[in-house]
Amino acid sequence: MNEARPINRKILLGLVIGVTLAASLSAVAATNRDPVDQQTVEVGAATPLDPPMRQDVKLTAQEAKNRAREEAALSKTVSKLRRDLGNAYAGAWYDASKRKLMVGIIDRTYVGAVRQAGAEPRLLKNNLVGLTGAKARIDRMGASAPSAIVAWYVDPPTNTVVIEAKKDPAADSFIERAKGNGDLVRVSWTTKGAQTFADVIGGRGYTIGGSRCSIGFSANGASGTKHIVTAGHCTASGGLVLADGVELGRVNAGIFDTDGDFGLIDITDPVAVTTASVDTRDGGPITVTGTEQAPIGASVCRSGQTSGFACGEVTAIDETVNYGDGKIVRGLTRTSICGEPGDSGGPFLSGTQAQGVASGGIGDCTNNGTTFFQPINEATTKLGVSIVVG
């Protein structure tokens, strides 16, 4: 990856170090078709790619821009179908190979409604209410999770709750309890644990004490105060924030527990100007226009001070991650993009929509790693700020 450029403090910080390309999700054309026979609705896994294959997907900046035109408005379609289908809804995801929004249902009478919305139905066994209930039960067990239990999340394409774990007797015991008597839970074995992407090496980006992280999004307080939203594990200890050795701000908040991984920096540099721009390194700044959540399968991009700019896909949402030493974080989104120490806090976008700030990941960019981000809407709501948009 290219070496990161130093921050121009006078332009600031709105040129958020890290990330992203832009993209919106493009309107799914609505088609009016009559309900079809149940034989035409596939039952079971909704994509030929199993989770490990999906995690291998990598997009260049141009590929992500092209997909942006096809993916616009998916979040609105998903939200409407979730309301309309009620308990028949079993989750949704974007299938890039078909260039289509896929929607799981447990009642074939809703096939027509899904197709009228421009999506493709998949008849599945378990509804989303049941899956999220199973995950919530595992969440309640989280405090007893050994370090060999890496993460767990609802996976709509496979209609299961996935526990990612390293082979270990302690993990086996936890998994058996998590499975209970049902068949909602399956295991994905891994050899790597989750880690945050802050490190103790000084350098570009910003530093707090001996830790280095990446700037996230510019934000404003209700009274017009200027802030940066970043990862909570970067700011959890508080203190002075430096950029290029000069005071940039001071920590206001840092949350790194089951409530999430998000932090707030108050900008104290008098020449800092917050903007709606994010820096894509070589492609020029992108203007953030909103914060609509992208569905599973949608394109997403990020960059960090260490690993630079990269694109991939959303592969899971509302994931619970065990970082070890009792640090379990709920509500994270997983992507197929790798990350490295120092990337924590950097922004993620899908199109021009802000998605979140980097929390951590599994593996690294040498070994086809994955990353997790803290969803931005939850972070800004709890912090009492709003992202700067253009």
Image (cartoon, helix red, strand yellow):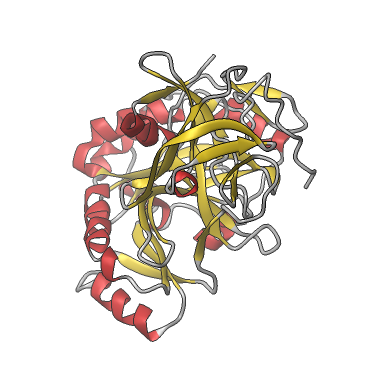
Residue 280 position, x and y percent, is 69, 32
In this rendering, the answer to whether 61 lies above or below 201 is above
> As rendered, which of 299 and 195 lies closer to the eye?
195
Observer-nearest residue: 334 or 74?
334
Q: How many marks?
A: 0
Q: Residue at x 24, y 75 (%)?
A: 177
Q: Nearer the viewer, residue 62 or 301?
A: 301
Residue at x 59%, y 27% (from the top left corner): 23
Q: Residue sitting at 58 percent across and 18 percent down?
A: 270
Can the viewer see residue 184 in this picture? Answer: yes
**In the displayed structure image, the side of residue 285 where residue 139 appears, left or right:** left
Q: Quadrant of the C terminus?
A: top right
Residue 176 place in picture, x, y as percent:
28, 78
Q: Looking at the image, is 379 positioned above or below residue 57?
A: above
Work out whether residue 228 or residue 138 is closer to the camera in this orientation and state it.
Answer: 228
Q: Is residue 43 visible?
A: no
Residue 17 in percent (x, y) is at: 64, 34
